[in-house]
Image (spheres, rainbow, N blue to C red):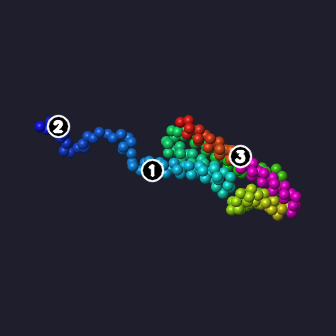
């Protein structure tokens, strides 16, 4: 037999017409590993942020927000729309307000001195390095010691320490609730899209 196939003549000074590849085949081979890595980073940010909500040294709500924003960006804001990222940002900012206002409100309610507020802050930072018991009780001790140094009245120092501590505990509970609201919106967006 004779060869009956047509021979294609290539142009001498121009590109060869090649059929376009489907979108999936034209992607950079690093796309999926990078998306997976960045998705893992978003999950880690959210997890560390949740832990940071109760640990004073870690900006919990900010990390949760960063994780949500990163996850939304990875998906081109399709599964997680921009409005969820905006609301999560507002809620994250609200946790900062709650954090400052709650401890100050507890201290102000009993007329604490600036020394008591500083003592509570120092006790909170020291509590990070001493475990859960330190986190719970060093802010109280710090506020009481600060008030005692300012006023030299043991009963008043105890009241101020307790009030400041209650403010911190209530503030932390509010922050946890706000962060879980952020997470709820995030998970709902993922599940409903």
- Dot 1 alpha-carbon crowd within 10 angstroms: few under 14, some 14 to 19, many 20 or more: few
Q: Residue 174 carries which label?
A: 3
| Residue at (32% x, 39% y) in the render | 20
Q: Can you say which quadrant of the picture contains the N terminus? A: top left
**Dot 2: element:** loop
Q: Residue 13, percent across and down?
A: 20, 45
Q: Which of marks 2 and 1 is nearer the N terminus?
A: 2
- Dot 2 alpha-carbon crowd within 10 angstroms: few under 14, some 14 to 19, many 20 or more: few
Instruction: Report, in whole angstroms, how far the alpha carbon at label 1 lies from the one at label 3.
Output: 38 Å
Instruction: Report, in whole angstroms, how far the alpha carbon at label 3 lies from the one at label 2.
Output: 77 Å
| Residue at (63% x, 50% y) in the render | 50
Q: Are marks 3 and 2 in contact (CB under 8 Å)?
A: no
**Dot 3: element:** helix
Q: Can residue 150 be seen in this view?
A: no
Q: Residue 103, percent across and down?
A: 75, 52
Magenta part of the protein: which range?
152-172
Looking at the rendered image, the disc whose residue lies closer to the viewer, 1 or 3, is: 1
- Dot 3 alpha-carbon crowd within 10 angstroms: few under 14, some 14 to 19, many 20 or more: some
Q: Residue 108, percent across and down?
A: 80, 51
| In magenta stretch: residue 17 | no
| Residue at (81% x, 56% y) in the render | 161
Instruction: Report, in whole angstroms, how far the alpha carbon at label 2 lies from the one at label 1.
Output: 43 Å
Q: Residue 33 carries which label?
A: 1
Q: Do the residues labelled 2 and 1 touch (CB within 8 Å)?
A: no
Up/down of 12 relative to 148, above or below: above
| Residue denoted by label 2 | 5
Determine whether, in the image, residue 15 is placed left or right of residue 124: left
Determine whether, in the image, residue 172 is placed left or right of residue 109: left
């Amino acid at each position: 037999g004779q060869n009956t196939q047509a021979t294609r003549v290539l142009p001498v000074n121009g590109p060869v017409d090649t059929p376009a590849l489907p979108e999936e085949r034209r992607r950079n081979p690093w796309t999926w590993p990078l998306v997976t890595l960045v998705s893992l980073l978003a999950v880690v940010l959210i997890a560390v942020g949740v832990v940071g909500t109760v640990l004073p040294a870690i900006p919990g709500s900010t990390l949760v927000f960063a994780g949500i924003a990163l996850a939304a960006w990875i998906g081109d804001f399709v599964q997680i729309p921009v409005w969820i990222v905006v609301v999560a940002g507002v809620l994250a900012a609200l946790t900062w307000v709650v954090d400052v206002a709650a401890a100050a409100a507890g201290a102000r309610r009993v007329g604490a001195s600036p020394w008591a507020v500083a003592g509570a802050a120092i006790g909170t930072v020291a509590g990070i390095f001493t475990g859960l018991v330190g986190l719970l009780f060093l802010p109280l001790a710090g506020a009481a010691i600060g008030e005692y140094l300012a006023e030299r009245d043991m009963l008043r120092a105890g009241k101020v320490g307790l009030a400041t501590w209650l403010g911190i505990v209530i503030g932390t509970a509010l922050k946890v609730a706000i962060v879980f609201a952020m997470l709820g919106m995030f998970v709902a967006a993922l599940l409903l899209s």
